[in-house]
Amino acid sequence: MFDPAAILIDVAGVLLIVWVFHLIRRDHLYVGYAAMVVLVIVAGLITLSVPPLLARVNRLGLLLTSAAGLVVLALAFVLLMLVYILSQLTQLSNRVTALTQELAIRRTSPDVDEVRPDRPDGHQGAAR
């Protein structure tokens, strides 16, 4: 028989994977970060879907703590925050890359009238 809680968690996991792929498509999450997150989600979903494997994990979890449900909620929160933080880090990195490229273009463009002390005439472009 199917456990309704496991089905709900599977649906939530699939939605989280869809969200991660959406972030990748919008260039808000690096593919490497997304691969790590998706692997963790898939491993968790497989663990929840295979009852003998889930029983072993529960036995191991009960050895460490008696609050297995609380641990699952805490781990879910940590996973969501991990995706959010990696997404923000990716956006910041993309902005730095864009600014660096723009700065490099401005410094090498001959039509920019910018004062440069390394040129005898003081300008970046051709001598006037």
Image (spheres, grey):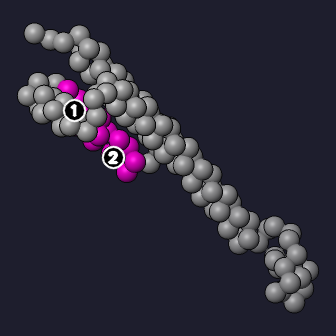
Q: Nearer the viewer, residue 115 or 94?
A: 94
* Residue 64 x %, y %: 25, 39
**Relative to residue 21, is residue 34 depicted above or below?**
below
| Residue 36 numbered tag | 2
**Relative to residue 19, is residue 121 depicted above or below?**
below
Main secondary structure along the magenta-highlighted residues: helix
- Position of residue 123 in the picture relative to residue 1 (left or right): right
Query: Magenta residues?
Result: 32-48
Q: Residue at x 89, y 82 (%)?
A: 122
**Relative to residue 112, is residue 56 depicted above or below?**
above
Q: Secondary structure at mark 2?
A: helix
Amino acid type of the residue tagged 1 in the rendering:
Leu
Residue 14, quarter of picture: top left
Query: Are circles 2 and 1 on residues that touch, CB within 8 Å?
Result: no
Residue 48, quarter of picture: top left
- Position of residue 53 in the picture relative to residue 43 (left or right): left
Q: How many marks?
A: 2
Q: Nearer the viewer, residue 61 or 108?
A: 61
Q: Residues within 10 Å of mark 2 (few under 14, many from 20)?
A: few
Where's the C terminus, which quadrant? Answer: bottom right
- Position of residue 123 in the picture relative to residue 55 (left or right): right
Q: Residue at x 48, y 37 (%)?
A: 81
Q: Which residue is mark 1?
A: 62
